[in-house]
Image (cartoon, coloured by chain):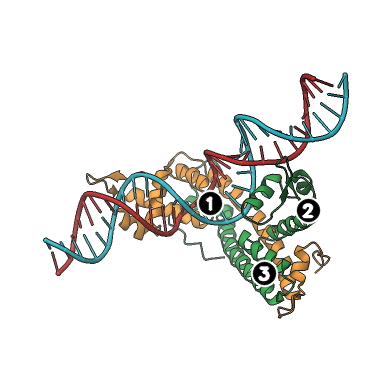
Chain colours: A orange, B green, C cyan, D red
Amino acid sequence: MNIGDVSRLSGLPAKTIRYYEEIGLVAPLRDDNGYRRFRESDLHRLAFLNRARSLGFTIEDCRGLLALYQDDHRASADVKRIAYEHLARIDEKLVELQAMRQTLAHLVNCCAGDNRPDCPILDDLAGAHPEQTKP
Amino acid sequence: MNIGDVSRLSGLPAKTIRYYEEIGLVAPLRDDNGYRRFRESDLHRLAFLNRARSLGFTIEDCRGLLALYQDDHRASADVKRIAYEHLARIDEKLVELQAMRQTLAHLVNCCAGDNRPDCPILDDLAGAHPEQTKP
DNA sequence: GTAATGCTTCCATCTACTGGAAGGTCAAGC
DNA sequence: GCTTGACCTTCCAGTAGATGGAAGCATTAC
């Protein structure tokens, strides 16, 4: 398979696949004309990467997960640890975003949004934000 | 005030303040020795930036917000629009993260996490994910 | 034969900083 | 006057994870 084929089949852009090769996540063969030749196993790795990335795993996580995926003697505890740590990072991010959302929604709600200059959003950003912790 | 002073007062690292000058968000004066000299107004801008960034506004959003902040003839509608669009982006991100969290939490929960190789997390990543949409 | 894809490499760009090296400046203490 | 340490300067490189584009072969369709 050429890069266009695995791109269609894995759902990853060709650019991204070349990038993944560059950073050692996949290692296709080469034809005489210089074209990359992908085996079924390469396609599986790329599909795996696409799914793992879509779940938000970092590239380094993916590297570890792929290594475990290939390792018949892995312990599922190692996989679980990577996933659990990622889950914890997601939870942190969620808390942060929800706090932002809370404050922003309140400010947007307070702003008249008309053609006058008075604006509680700017007031908050400028340092006067007494409502910030109130519901 | 020197950069160390505004760093302490605004809560922004000196490195970040230099970077903000480089991209035109703040324009301190210079002393004869080459040191940056910050006025009160510069400090206000930096504190404004710190707050806006902590609410997740992009640098370009901040640029717009600062311009409106300085503009006595602004319409609060313009501020509100920037904030509202940012809120919408946050909501998108939240939905995405919550979906990831949901799937990940389920997978982590299903994984034995012992020394055996069987692992529903890897099974999912490898393409077999029948449980993905189920609760 | 030629036009349209498809493939290659290489370099630049994005966001928002952050780290570090090499070196100038200033205030305190002796 | 000299040293020490804290502060300041610029410049360059690197982070994550791609993505865009240019210049130039290869292959296929007609």
Can you tell which of label 2 and label 1 is closer to the viewer?
Answer: 2
Residue located beneath label 3 in the image: B83
Q: CA distance from mark 3 to mark 1?
A: 29 Å
Q: Using the image, name the chain to which the residue with label 3 belongs.
A: B
Left or right of C13: which side holds A26? Answer: left
Residue located beneath label 1 in the image: A57
**Residue A126's spot in the image, x, y percent?**
77, 63
**Picture quarter containing residue A92?**
bottom right
Left or right of A35: which side holds A105? Answer: right
Q: Crowding at label 3, few (<14), some or many (≥20) Cα neighbours within 10 Å?
A: many
- Indicate which disc residue B39 carries: 2
Q: Of marks 3 and 2, which one's residue comes earlier in the chain? A: 2
**Which of the image's four quarters has the C terminus of chain B?**
bottom right
**Residue at 76%, 50% in the rendered image:** B38
Q: Is residue A38 visible?
A: no
Can you tell which of label 3 and label 1 is closer to the viewer?
Answer: 3
